[in-house]
Image (cartoon, rainbow, N blue to C red):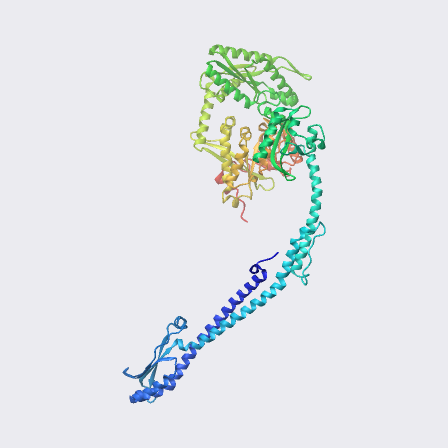
Amino acid sequence: MSVDFFQRISVRLARNVVLVALLIGLLGAALQVMIDARTQVRQFQSQLDEIALVSGSSAQRAVYLLDNVLAEEVIRGLSNYRFLHQVRILDDRQNVLAAYSVPIQSSQTAPFTQWFLGGLSKEYQYPLVNPDNGNTEGTLILALDNDMAMAPFYGRALYIFLSGLISNIFLALILLLLFNRLLTNPLTAIAQQIGSIGQYKLGQRGIRHPLGHERDELGFIVDSTNHFIEQVDCSQVKLKASELQLRVVVDSSPNLVFVLNKHQEIVFANQRMAEFYGTDIDTLLGKNYVDLQYSLNPLEADRIADEVIRVLDHGERINHDNATLTDIYHVERIVQVTRIPFSFSGTACVLSIAGDITDRVAAEAHVEHLAYYDTLTDLPNRNLILDRLEMDIRRAQRNGLYGAVMFVDIDDFKRINDTMGHSIGDQLLVAMSERMKVQMRRTDTLARVGGDEFVLSLPELSGQLVDAESKAAYLAEALNVRINAPIRIGEHEFRMSASIGIAIYSTKDETVEEMLRYADTAMYQAKRNGKHRHELFHPSMATEATRLVQLEHDLRQALLEDQFEVYLQPIVSQLDGSLVSAEALLRWQHPTKGLLTPIHFMTFLENSNMINDVGQLVIDRVCQYLAADNIDHQLPDNLRISINVSARELFHPDYVENVKATLLRYGLTGQRLEFEITEGVAIQSIADAIEIMRQLKTLGITFALDDFGTGYSSLSYLKQLPVDTVKIDKSFINDITHDNQDAALVACIMAIAQTLNLKTVAEGVEELDQADWLRQYEGVCMQGYLYSKPIPMPDFHQQWKKPAA
């Protein structure tokens, strides 16, 4: 190993030290020269003053007597000073009595003199004063040759600079030798030893200390290097053990892992691969994999051969998310396969990893079935019936045939569910659905769209409206007869009935939402008329339908014209009434009806797709409010605002991504939001609801179960849903101070919440005695008119701002 001379550390150190010393020396020399120059100038001026003083009396007598001879003698005396290039004696009328002048000689130092003194010549005038009367009788003029006068100074300056340069050169040579001996040579020796480490065997590698450097920095480098070598030796031992462990891990993998060479021979295989083909690893190695697979499934073998060639010839990575592979038992399994170029022992090969996903695919198919079918009755759910009904209506319009949609609601089912229990209720619903399916034609679709609500689509009943209405009425009557027949569930016998609403769809341009709305209106008319009957939607019922159509139109205009406002209602601590969080509540500033609360429009809104736009509007307004610069300075730090979320919003395919995008847009974290859902939202698809909630909780968003206690399955679903808070419904809070049953129920809810480590919020606290009753339970928060009505956002932080520090 050799290093270029000028790249050696010693040379570079010496060079840098010399440059620094030279710079300091130059600065010192320059300072000394400047001081010397100023001293030299002062000396000239003093010398001129002395010359003028000595020659002044003679020059004054010559002027007084107008003696030209005497004046010439004075001039001759002054001409002996070589640095005076011009001398003149003037009388009081400025006439020249005598003069002397020689030209200024050019020299190499003239430019410096010109720069330093501002010129090569400088004239000095001395008045000739009569000592007897003090009158000025003439003038002595001395002109100085500045370059001649500065000559001694230039000699001294040259000496200073040359001596400094020579001393720095000697310093550089000395430092070069010193650094080379103390640093470069030991470092070179260390580097040579390090470079030859690879020649030694494991455990015999190490480098020696340079002589005299056992305890200095070079010795530390040697010690650190030897320590590193020991660690490398130890790592190599561990690496060999790790290779054995890696083999165990690969053999333990549930995936088929194997390597094929260019001849398609198996050069590596794990234990799962051997089990898949009913043999052991040693037997597999060396076999032609394509031939092995050909004996099981020729089509798969041809595909594998083609893929191996593509990977080897083009270096192409191949991924299959859904391929087939036949095992030794001739069972076709579904696998995810990855094939990548791989160097195995220096040979170009193909690494294949195949994961058996047969069970997962079956599970996904089951999940997809759950997305479109009711888990209890296995009937189509709301999602599927909407699609089927859309197709039935469009087919009726194309073919000119009338069809019907029935909205079926089991009468008084909630009473049975509440008195007999959910298990009996579920069995009853299954039995009802089985009876209704018997009534169906092959082209009909029956769906369960709610707890006890069913929708039946009857396409292509007739080409005549009257006939279609008659057939639909007949089918509805027959359906109710079947439903009304006695049914036994365990030890109990029931006779059920249904209220059925019928809407006829025809060649008109009618939508699914309109038809369902018409059928729903007719069903409610049947209930108003005594239940256990059917009603056909006709124009006399149009008032309600028209109201709903107008409501839909007004709601769309409200979205377009930004008529919705978000109010906030505080949620306070039971201890001191301080602000804990707030709930966002929607208000509609109707152009003619004034400010409307959700009771006037929310039910319709939640059953339409507009709820997604309105819900996004609420999230936007809340995030914008929380992101405002002045909010955190006035409200408690990291105030959380809760937002009500409907089923359509929660189960929208893009809901989670939309929430993420909104938080990112306003620079917020999910810790600032809480989503309130009802149990009715969750139970539409409990598995999907739980998954969506868990995705949102990874953003920091918490969940509250709203209207807790009012549903038919609150307690059962409370254990499954990943909620953080339960909100006790206002209907229970109203009478807690004078109704023992409500008081006991609220106490029970709070005990359950505490057991499950959930927060509790009491809604609708309007009276002081209600708040006092609730304070006996630790940790409950309160919300209601006792503390504040919902107020507009701009006023909220003014009313509830935190006290000044």
Q: Nearer the viewer, residue 228 or 786?
A: 228
Percent x, y for residue 611?
A: 50, 29
Q: Quadrant of residue 245?
A: top right
Q: Nearer the viewer, residue 50 or 398?
A: 50
Task: Tell me, yes or no, if residue 121 can be seen here.
Answer: yes
The residue sitting at 70% across, 34% down in the picture is 252
Please state the total of marks drawn on the protein image: 0
Q: Quadrant of the N terminus?
A: bottom right
Q: Viewed as shown, does residue 444 lie left or right of 421?
A: left
Percent x, y for residue 161?
A: 49, 71
Q: Nearer the viewer, residue 587 or 233?
A: 233
Percent x, y for residue 218?
A: 65, 59
In the rendered view, tell whether residue 224 sits above or below residue 803: below
Task: Tell me, yes or no, if residue 706 can be seen here.
Answer: no
Q: Viewed as shown, does residue 729 lie left or right of 329?
A: left
In the rendered view, tell whether residue 123 sits above or below residue 692: below
The residue sitting at 71% across, 42% down in the picture is 241
Q: Residue furthest front?
A: 263
Q: Nearer the viewer, residue 689 or 129?
A: 129
Percent x, y for residue 626?
A: 51, 41
The residue sitting at 27% across, 83% down in the picture is 93
